């Protein structure tokens, strides 16, 4: 009997937050791993192999005070997962690791991070001005390689797959560590948490891993400390949804790259597409979000985000919905 095991990641709750979160909807249950009947599995397989064509899904922009006004600019936010983590390739690593809750990248993860940064630089069609990073080591290492590729000035040899001996222009973007982008702090995501509750993140040490001259020490973090341990799945999803908007609001004139974890990338899709089912987020997969920014005097108004990436296009697999969410 052929069974398909699919992880359903329903949309997170929408938080009512100033002008961007327009309403509140009830939270769905946590993710379930389902074994499908063969007939249902066959139908799902047909959907996965031959999905219906879809147009770019856009959330309607929030009304401006001037109904005829055009946005002064459009802000892009790219939400990206870290590269390949060592504990998923070397199961015995945790038995000797001093920090089993904070695995580094394997070599393939470093390569994937650099190549993804190069892809973002060459294919996005807009510059990245600022990068925010989860404090977990795998995310900082991913950001280091991606930022090097984004800042490269002599990256003509496409056979190069790392930042060694690469010349960069650090003035192109700035990087900051943000606690709010961290992994879900529960046992569904972290199998071996610190027994004393101390995550042991040395921010200065982590910042030293980033390309020289790119770290911005002046940015105030949205989360002053790590979220509380044993947060619920729904609570973590609400956090991811909130932090994406909060960081975008901090820098409305800049395009952002957020280096985070798989659940955060999934939320960046499911918060925009109502009832969309995200079932896979590959290493270094990313979503591309865009929203209009209306400037007036010393303030700004932002419309809703729209999702510019289609299923499977950038490593995120989901069954799309034709209906739009009121989130983000």
Image (tube, rainbow, N blue to C red):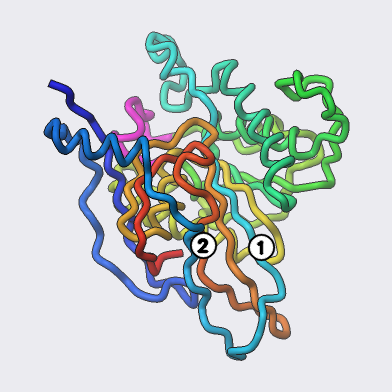
- Depth check, front residue: 36 or 326: 36
**Which mark is on residue 251?**
1
- Depth check, front residue: 299 or 197: 299
Residue at the image position 47 percent from the left and 42 percent from the top = 182
Residue at the image position 12 percent from the left and 33 percent from the top = 37
Which residue range is magenta in the image? Answer: 183-198
Q: Distance between the residues labelled 2 and 1?
A: 18 Å
Residue 119 pos. (x, y %): 68, 36
Residue 284 pos. (x, y %): 54, 34
- Magenta residues: mostly which secondary structure? loop
Q: Toward which corner of the image does residue 221 lie, by quadrant?
A: bottom right
The answer to whether residue 119 is above or below residue 287 is above
Dot 1: few (<14), some (14–19), or many (≥20) neighbours within 10 Å?
few
Tell which tag, 2 or 1, sits nearer the viewer: 2
The answer to whether residue 248 is above or below residue 153 is below
The residue tagged 2 is 306
127 left or right, relative to 65: right
**Which mark is on residue 106?**
none
- Is residue 184 in the magenta section? yes
The number of numbered discs placed on residues in the rendered structure image is 2
Dot 2: few (<14), some (14–19), or many (≥20) neighbours within 10 Å?
many
Residue at the image position 17 percent from the left and 23 percent from the top = 2
Of the numbered discs 2 and 1, the one sitting upstream in the chain is 1
- Depth check, front residue: 17 or 51: 51
255 left or right, relative to 271: right
Mark 1 lies on a secondary structure that is loop
Mark 2 lies on a secondary structure that is strand
- Quadrant of the image containing the N terminus: top left
Residue 15 pos. (x, y %): 37, 66
Tag 2–tag 1 contact (CB < 8 Å) = no
Residue at the image position 62 percent from the left and 48 percent from the top = 257
């Amino acid at each position: 009997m052929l069974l398909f095991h699919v992880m359903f990641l329903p949309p997170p709750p929408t938080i009512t937050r100033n002008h961007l979160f327009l309403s509140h909807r009830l939270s769905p249950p946590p993710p379930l791993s389902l074994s499908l009947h063969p007939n249902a599995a066959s139908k799902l397989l047909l959907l996965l192999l031959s999905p219906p064509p879809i147009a770019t899904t856009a959330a309607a922009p929030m009304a401006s005070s001037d109904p005829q006004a055009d946005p002064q600019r459009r802000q892009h936010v790219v939400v990206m997962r870290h590269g390949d983590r060592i504990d998923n390739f070397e199961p015995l690593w945790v038995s000797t690791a001093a920090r089993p809750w904070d695995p580094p990248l394997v070599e393939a993860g470093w390569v994937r991070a650099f190549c993804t940064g190069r892809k973002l630089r060459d294919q996005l069609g807009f510059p990245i001005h600022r990068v925010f990073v989860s404090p977990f080591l795998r995310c900082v290492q991913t950001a280091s390689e991606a930022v090097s590729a984004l800042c490269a000035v002599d990256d003509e040899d496409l056979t190069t797959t790392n930042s060694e001996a690469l010349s960069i222009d650090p003035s192109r973007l700035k990087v900051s560590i943000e606690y709010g982008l961290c992994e879900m702090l529960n046992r569904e995501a972290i199998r071996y948490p610190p027994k004393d509750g101390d995550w042991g993140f040395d921010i200065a040490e982590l910042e030293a891993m980033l390309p020289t001259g790119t770290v911005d020490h002046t940015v105030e973090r949205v989360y002053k400390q790590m979220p509380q341990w044993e947060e619920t799945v729904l609570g973590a999803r609400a956090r991811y949804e909130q932090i994406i908007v909060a960081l975008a609001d901090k820098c409305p004139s800049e395009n952002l790259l957020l280096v985070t974890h798989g659940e955060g990338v999934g939320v960046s899709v499911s918060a925009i597409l109502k009832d969309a089912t995200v079932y896979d987020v590959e290493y270094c997969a990313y979503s591309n979000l865009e929203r209009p920014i209306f400037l007036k005097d010393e303030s700004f108004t932002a419309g809703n985000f729209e999702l510019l990436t289609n299923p499977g296009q950038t490593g995120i697999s989901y069954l799309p919905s034709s209906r739009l969410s009121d989130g983000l």
